[in-house]
């Protein structure tokens, strides 16, 4: 009898720290990140769509820039292009 009680007590002592760790982890996930840690990406709204420019990128905010160019998207602004 005493051996079973000791084994059950050891199991209980091992489970208690896991319960506390899982609670702390859940509380941390629900917290909102401070605004200083979130990057502000709303500033950049347009990109260079000229293939000859040195700052031409194939993708811009998840969009294919070639497709933006051929559909005359307002996201294209060739005044932003840099040439050598």
Image (cartoon, rainbow, N blue to C red):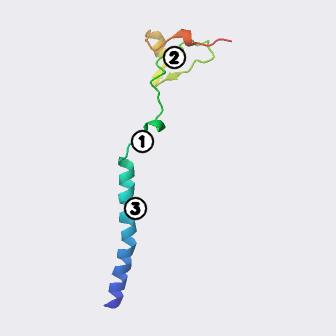
User: With 75 as the anchor, is 55 left or right in this view?
Assistant: right
Mark 3 neighbour density, 10 Å: few (under 14) some (14–19) many (20 or more): few
Observer-nearest of 73 and 30: 30
Query: Which label is found at residue 65?
Result: none
Q: Quadrant of residue 11?
A: bottom left
Q: Earlier in the sequence, mark 1 or mark 3?
A: 3
Q: Earlier in the sequence, mark 3 or mark 2?
A: 3
Kindly report the distance in space between the C-alpha atoms of the residues bearing marks 3 and 2.
Answer: 46 Å
Is there CB contact under 8 Å for labels 1 and 3?
no
Name the residue furthest bottom: 1
Q: Is residue 43 above or below residue 74?
A: below
Observer-nearest of 51 and 9: 9
Disc 2 element: loop
Q: Is residue 8 above or below residue 22?
A: below
Q: Position of residue 45 (x, y in %)?
A: 46, 19
Quarter holding the C terminus is top right
Residue at mark 2: 47
Which residue is found at the position 51% from the left and 16% from the top?
47
Disc 3 element: helix
Residue at mark 3: 21
Mark 1 neighbour density, 10 Å: few (under 14) some (14–19) many (20 or more): few
Mark 2 neighbour density, 10 Å: few (under 14) some (14–19) many (20 or more): many
Name the residue furthest left: 1
Residue at mark 1: 33
Q: Quadrant of residue 10?
A: bottom left
Q: Position of residue 42 (x, y in %)?
A: 44, 24
Q: Position of residue 24 (x, y in %)?
A: 38, 57
Q: Nearer the viewer, mark 1 or mark 3?
A: 1
Q: Nearer the viewer, mark 1 or mark 2?
A: 1
Disc 1 element: loop
Quarter holding the N terminus is bottom left
Q: Quadrant of residue 17?
A: bottom left
């Amino acid at each position: 009898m005493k051996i079973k009680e000791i084994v059950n007590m050891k199991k209980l002592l091992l489970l208690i720290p896991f319960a506390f760790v899982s609670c702390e982890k859940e509380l941390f996930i629900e917290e909102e990140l401070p605004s200083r840690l979130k990057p502000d990406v709303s500033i950049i709204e347009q990109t260079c769509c000229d293939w000859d420019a040195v700052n031409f990128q194939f993708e811009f905010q998840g969009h294919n820039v070639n497709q933006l160019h051929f559909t005359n998207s307002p996201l294209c602004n060739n005044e932003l292009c840099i040439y050598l």
